[in-house]
């Protein structure tokens, strides 16, 4: 296999949804329990059979800690050097101050 210089792989929405879930450490079953989405909905989205609703995309972003814009478009929302690390789950962050 010969690599093409400058080739950038294209990730579909389905790829980004799966990668977000896996990077957050969830199996599909656990993710379904965590988000109250049906496992079939998750599977269909990750296999490219169905695009989730915007509400489910936002929930997916919150539950995995990735930016909604990246899930939806594949673009990083900003590039100012700020780490793109969000909360690990869907619980609101709490202040210790």
Image (tube, rainbow, N blue to C red):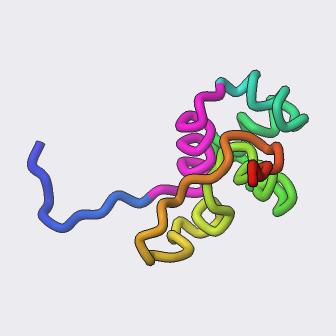
| Residue at the outermost right position | 36
For the residue pair 86 and 60, the one nearer the viewer reads as 86
Residue 67 position (above or below residue 24): below
Residue in the picture at 30% in, 63% down: 8
Residue 34 position (above or below residue 67): above
Give the magenta-colored segment's residue range: 11-26
Residue in the picture at 48% in, 67% down: 82
Residue in the picture at 12% in, 64% down: 5
Residue in the picture at 62% in, 47% down: 17
Q: Give how far across and how far down residue 87 sits, in percent.
A: 68, 47
In the picture, the quarter occupied by the N terminus is: top left
Residue 58 in the figure: left or right of residue 66: right
Q: Give how far across and how far down residue 81 sits, in percent.
A: 41, 71
Residue 29 in the figure: left or right of residue 6: right
Count of numbered labels shown in the rendering:
0
Q: Is residue 45 magenta?
A: no
In the picture, the quarter occupied by the C terminus is: bottom right
Residue 45 in the figure: left or right of residue 13: right
For the residue pair 53 and 60, the one nearer the viewer reads as 60
What secondary structure is the magenta-colored segment mainly? helix
């Amino acid at each position: 296999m010969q690599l093409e210089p400058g080739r950038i792989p294209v990730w579909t929405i389905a790829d980004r949804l799966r990668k977000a879930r896996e990077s957050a450490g969830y199996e599909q079953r656990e993710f379904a329990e965590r988000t109250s989405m049906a496992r079939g909905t998750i599977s269909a989205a990750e296999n490219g059979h169905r695009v989730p609703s915007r509400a489910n995309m936002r929930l997916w972003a919150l539950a995995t800690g990735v930016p909604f814009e990246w899930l939806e478009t594949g673009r990083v929302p900003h590039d100012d050097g700020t780490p793109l690390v969000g909360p690990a789950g869907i619980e609101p962050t709490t202040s210790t101050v």
